[in-house]
Image (tube, rainbow, N blue to C red):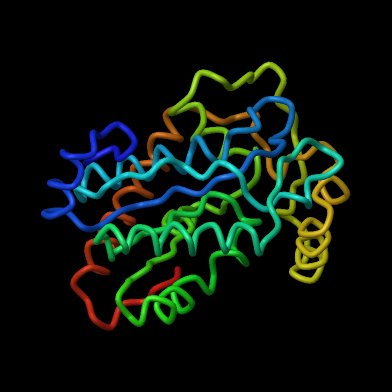
Amino acid sequence: MVVVKDQLDPDLRKIIKKQKAVIIPVGSIEQHGPHLPVSTDSDIVYEVARRVSEKCNFLLLPTISYGVSFEHAPFFNLSLKRQTLEQLLIDICLSLSSNDINSIFILNGHHGNQKAVENLSKKINRLSKKKVRVFVFSYWHFMKHEFDHAGFVETSLMLAISKKVKMKRAQVGLITKNLSKKEKSRIAKLASKSFPSATRNGIWGNPMKSTAKDGKKFLAQIVRNLTKKSQTCLTDKSRKLHH
């Protein structure tokens, strides 16, 4: 693994001649209930990207810590417009290509970013005249357990990687287990427009029984599956570019 921001220019140019695959973590700055920091999405996606980079020997770029999080207002969020995040990533990918790096993995860590990243592969492929390969993944698609927001899964992941969690302040959030599919769909649509209206306290799920042990299991599963997928992407011509 090569952490790009820590390299000296002459050394980095030599490294790029041998290693031409890079990973870009994309997170957010937004509320995660009263017990998790607003950097949660960025913290988790960076750690996943770091571990995948280590296993695959990728170049690791700095995390893009700002995402599309307007739905969390009036709770705290620092948000970019969808078009802004999309254009930022396009510019970075084309800039990487100008530096002879043409295999790019974008790892998304926030659900609200998905519309901004879903068509990036096709757009960059067209703009670069098919020179650049971009693979876009959201890390929670690589685990079996149902994901949440500041609930059991996300809190467990943070307990495994961070000392910022304040479990004494944790609260039970929106529980959808016994709701009908129709009701779950209605609440999901509401949450996409106003997360606090759907959850009240900004938590989707129950973080009360979260543990670092569970977080380590989730993290290991995500990294294992993402590593396998990433390696396949670089060798399989019929690969999917978005997952």
Q: Residue 198: x percent and y percent?
A: 84, 51
Q: In this view, does 146 lie above or below 157?
A: below
Q: In which quarter of the image is residue 127?
A: bottom left
Relative to the observer, which residue lies in front, 54 or 23?
Answer: 23
Residue depicted at x 33% and y 81%: 130
Q: In this view, does 65 lie above or below 104?
A: above
Q: Residue drawn 52% across and 49% down?
A: 109
Give x and y (percent) for residue 149.
65, 44
Residue 12: x, y in percent?
A: 20, 42
Depth check: give the residue in front, 158 or 205. 158
Task: Tell me the quarter of the picture where residue 5 sits.
Answer: top left
Question: Is residue 73 among the parts visible in the rendering?
Answer: yes
Decide: is 36 above or below 150.
above
Q: Quadrant of the N terminus?
A: top left
From the viewer's perspective, tell me whether residue 192 is left or right of residue 166: right
Q: Which of 180 and 62 is in front in this view?
A: 62
Any part of residue 153 in sight: no
Residue at x 44%, y 73% (from the top left corner):
124
- Side of 131 where 26 appears, left or right: right
Please tell me whether residue 38 is drawn above or below residue 148 in the rendered image: above
Q: Where is residue 138 in the image (x, y as percent from the top left)?
A: 48, 58
